[in-house]
Amino acid sequence: MPEKKTMEEARTAKRQGKSPSTQAGAFVHEEIEHVREGKHGARSAKQAIAIGLSKARRAGVKLPPPPKSASERTKQAAKRDSARAGKATRPSASRSRAAKKALAGEPKASASKTALSRQARAAAKRRPAKARKAAAKKAARTRARREQS
C-alpha cells in the first residue's frame, strides 16, 4: 500500500491537471526511497521504476500500458494493475512475504544517483533527436521562468 503522503502528492498533481506520468512520479519516487532506506532492493533502476509504476496503476493513476516495444507479459501485467485500481483486496500474506524476501537480497545501489542517471540517459537515447531537443527547450524555458520569480 502506498504511503498517505504519496497518495496526496498524486491527487494534487491530478487536480492541477498534470499528466498521468507526472502523477505516477510520486509513486516511483516513493519506491526509490524504499530501496535507498533498505526496505528492499531492486535488481536495477528499471525494476525500481517498474514497481513504482505498478503501484501507481493500482492506486488509480490512468497510465497507459507500455509501448509496442514492451513484452506481451509486461503489457498484460499493466492491464491487470489498471483493472485492480480502486479494488482494495488484501494481498495474500504468503505471496507478499515471498516478494519482499526476493527483493530483500537485491542490491540497494540500483537506486543510487549514478544508477538513476544512467537509466535516464539510456531512456533518453532511445527517443528521437527531435523529442530530446523539445525536452531540452522546455527545460530551458522552465529554468528561465524559475529564475524570474
Image (cartoon, rainbow, N blue to C red):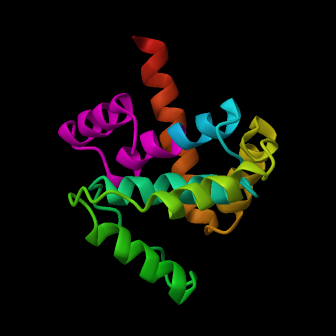
User: Percent from the top left, x then y, of residue 70?
Assistant: 56, 81
| x and y percentages locating residue 38 in the rendered image | 70, 35
If the image is split into quadrants, where does the C terminus sit? top left
Residue visible at 23% across and 43% down in the picture: 14
Does residue 16 show up magenta in the picture?
yes
Residue 122, placed above or below residue 37: below
127 on left or right of 10: right
Residue extending furthest top?
Answer: 149
Query: In the image shown, does 97 or 28 lie closer to the viewer?
Result: 97
Res 78 → quadrant: bottom left
The extreme bottom residue here reads 72
Q: Which residues are magenta?
A: 1-29
Residue nearest the viewer, comparing 64 with 52: 52
Lateral position of residue 46 relative to residue 31, left or right: right
The residue positioned farthest toward the front in the image shown = 94
Residue 132: in sight, yes or no?
no
Instruction: Please tell me whether the stretch drawn in magenta is mainly helix, strand or loop.
Output: helix
Q: Is residue 35 left or right of residue 136?
A: right
Q: Is residue 40 at all visible to an observer of this figure?
A: yes
Residue 66 versus residue 21 in the image, above or below = below
Q: Quadrant of residue 13?
A: top left
In the image, what residue occupies the spot 71% across and 45% down?
116
Q: Residue at x 39, y 60 (%)?
A: 91
Q: How many dots with numbers?
A: 0
Magenta span contains residue 79: no
Question: What percent of the width, then of the height, locates residue 5?
Answer: 36, 28
Name the image quarter holding residue 136: top right
